[in-house]
Amino acid sequence: MMKKKTIWFINKDAAPIEFYGTHLRTIKLAQYFQSEGYNVKLFCSSYVHNRNLCLSDSNKTFEEKTYDNIPFVLVNAGCGSTNGIRRIISYFRFAVKLFIHRKQFEKPDVIIHTSRIPFDIPIYQLAKKVKAKYIVDVTDLWPDSFVSLGLLGKNNPCVKIAYCLERYIYSKADNVVFSMPGAVNYVRENGWDSDQGGDN
């Protein structure tokens, strides 16, 4: 009998439905794969995005709980509902803690990562270390969102570095899934697709 494959869903901003969590797409995908016989584990922040609510009962780095029959791993990465530099730092802390403590959990066969490039690059390195198939699930175009909102200029050195890291992750991923219309054009306009001489 073949061993059931294990899928890690990594999405810092996902949260259980009962707590009005965001990113329900990730939870629904986890439920679907679980119903198809896969072992799933969903890694998210212990703080519910956009709410002043912490789901963890302790100060531990990780706390495992089950919501709607889905095994959650709540990661203590700091930050609450605020935006700005604290939120950016929390993305980085979340990714680094998972990378450092990856051996605490059953090795995944597949990682489906809702990425916030460039702040969570260590998740790709994690996938490489455990030799898991790495799928990037893009629900928001970071860093392009900052440019579109006028928060940063496209020629800002930090933005240029972020774009380079975004292209790097897309080229290294086994698959890239976009949940928004027009994202394929975004890749083409940046010259990252194979037809334009890129890697994707």
Image (cartoon, helix red, strand yellow):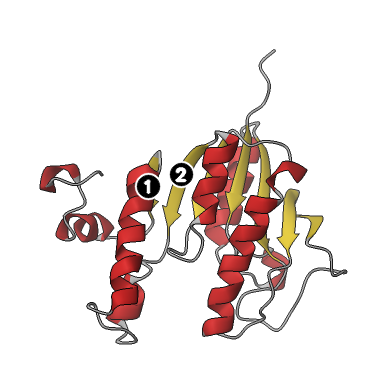
Image position, residue 124 (x, y; %): 50, 48
Q: Residue at x 57, y 68 (%)?
A: 91
The residue carrying mark 1 is 176
Task: Pick the residue in front: 184 or 195.
Answer: 195
Q: Is residue 13 visible?
A: no
Q: Amino acid at mark 1?
A: Val
Q: Residue at x 24, y 43 (%)?
A: 199
Residue 14 numbered mark, or none = none
Question: Quick one: SS at disc 2?
Answer: strand
35 sits to left or right of 29: right
Q: Residue at x 52, y 47 (%)?
A: 125
Q: Amino acid at mark 2?
A: Ile
Q: Is residue 40 visible?
A: yes
Q: Which quadrant does the C terminus fall into?
A: top left
Label 2–label 1 contact, CB within 8 A: yes
The residue carrying mark 2 is 135
